[in-house]
Image (cartoon, rainbow, N blue to C red):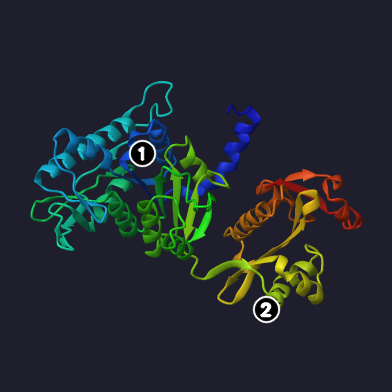
Amino acid sequence: MVLSHHDSIGLFRSSAPYINAHRGKTFVLMFGGEAIEEENFPNIIQDIALLSSLGVRLVLVHGARPQIDQRVALRKTEARFSHDMRITDKETLECVKDAAGSVRCHIEALLTMGLPNSPMHGARIRVCTGNLVVAKPMGVLDGVDFENTGQVRRIDTTGINDHLNDGSIVLLSPMGYSSTGEVFNLSHEDVATQAAIALKADKLIVFSNYAGIFRKDGKLLRTIERSQLEQLHRDAEIMTEDTVIRALTTSVAAGIARAHCVSYETDGALLQELFTRDGAGSLVMENHYEQLREATIDDVGGILNLIKPLEESGVLVKRSRERLENEIHQFIVIERDGMIIACAALYLYPDDGSAELACVATHADYRGKNRGERILDEVKERAAAAGIERLFVLTTVTAHWFLDQGFKPATIDALPSSKKELYNLQRKSKVFTLDV
């Protein structure tokens, strides 16, 4: 798709808040050996270089399972697994070192490439690696000796941060070293999650052959709380790879604020996830203290307290308690420690294929933290599930926010006929629409 000059400028401007938000932050990127063999991988490397040039501190963790498999087959060595982990004997360890070293060199070469007229021309990116992962043996598990298969004992955060502070990208392989000089074959999932946790990274981004976290019914879960994802995983309701799900949930449970899953097959998925409002994959969060849910009759008082200041200032149309009680199941709320801090209502007009987004409100103490965006995402999902094709909103004061969320200006004629009849000419609300 070729963007017009005007669209390109608009896209660049809309990404500015994300550029500012990500600058100086630490991201850990995890991708398996399958991603490295994908034809889109050079594009991912170019996008990684772009992130580095924008001031993001990057730690890359790669896997090498298919590359190890190839070398094991060439040596005619038996590949042995238990608990989905490779049993690494001395001969297999040589295959691991050969494969991991080859993959590391390939990634370093791609990050060094700076041909004229290429996206990385003049980038001059430094890639640093080394003995930054201290390992311990897996040992004997259920009677199986894993030999040189290991686990992460410690991440050298001081060494990694020194490299990051120098402006370098840190590259970690699925290998670790012990104080006795042994080499261990590690899971790249273990390396990535432990690195993210030890570094207190701002994000863990996991590349998958799926375009996010998918339920078995084919639904893409764009935003999901960790506890919900773990339950769906236990119920075998998730299609996305187990290694990806474990990395996402483990990191978030340990305090990583946001963990993302994006496709390694889709060109630009990483940038779209990080620099656009809707993203390209899935986001996993903890949200211990806040719950987004459908409102109940017990929430009426909390919603009234929330919207009262906005009604008094004329931002919202006044609602009586009786009306709110009758319409309560059309409301969505965010509750924090027993307090309603945000809400919105969704009124369906199924005959017209549209729905009204109304009574959008966030408590003054909790604005500016994307809570309105979270509610809007939930509203869009519910509208789409109900077969709605278009949202509309009437507003007098907050037009700028709806424009930021992708709504487009419209006329009164865009309203369903029953809503048009109730339009208040004196209030002169502006109309905006958004395709679901």
Label 2 packing within 10 angstroms: few (<14), some (14-19), many (20+): few
Tell me residue 336's x, y (percent).
57, 72
Residue 58 visible in the snapshot: yes
Tell me residue 195's x, y (percent).
30, 54
Q: Is residue 188 above or below residue 226?
A: above
Measure the C-alpha gap from mark 1 to mark 2: 49 Å
Tell me residue 287's x, y (percent).
50, 66
Residue 19 visible in the snapshot: no
The image quarter containing residue 38 is top left
The image quarter containing residue 371 is bottom right
Residue under the image location 56 percent in, 44 percent down = 276
The image quarter containing residue 301 is bottom right
**Dot 1: element:** helix
Lower sequence index among marks 1 and 2: 1
The amino acid marked with disc number 1 is Ala
Q: Is residue 108 above or below residue 281?
A: above
**Dot 2: element:** helix
- The residue beneath circle 2 is 298
Tell me residue 325's x, y (percent).
76, 75
Q: Is residue 212 above or below residue 254?
A: above
Residue under the image location 26 percent in, 51 percent down = 187
Residue under the image location 75 percent in, 47 percent down = 433
Quarter of the image containing the N terminus? Answer: top right
The amino acid marked with disc number 2 is Asp
Residue situated in front as seen by the camera: 326 or 197: 326
Label 1 packing within 10 angstroms: few (<14), some (14-19), many (20+): many
Q: Would residue 182 be found to the left or right of residue 248 on screen? A: left
Q: Would residue 235 be found to the left or right of residue 305 on screen? A: left
Q: Which mark is residue 35?
A: 1
Q: Would residue 118 be found to the left or right of residue 2 on screen? A: left
Q: Would residue 69 be found to the left or right of residue 243 on screen? A: left
Residue situated in front as seen by the camera: 222 or 126: 222
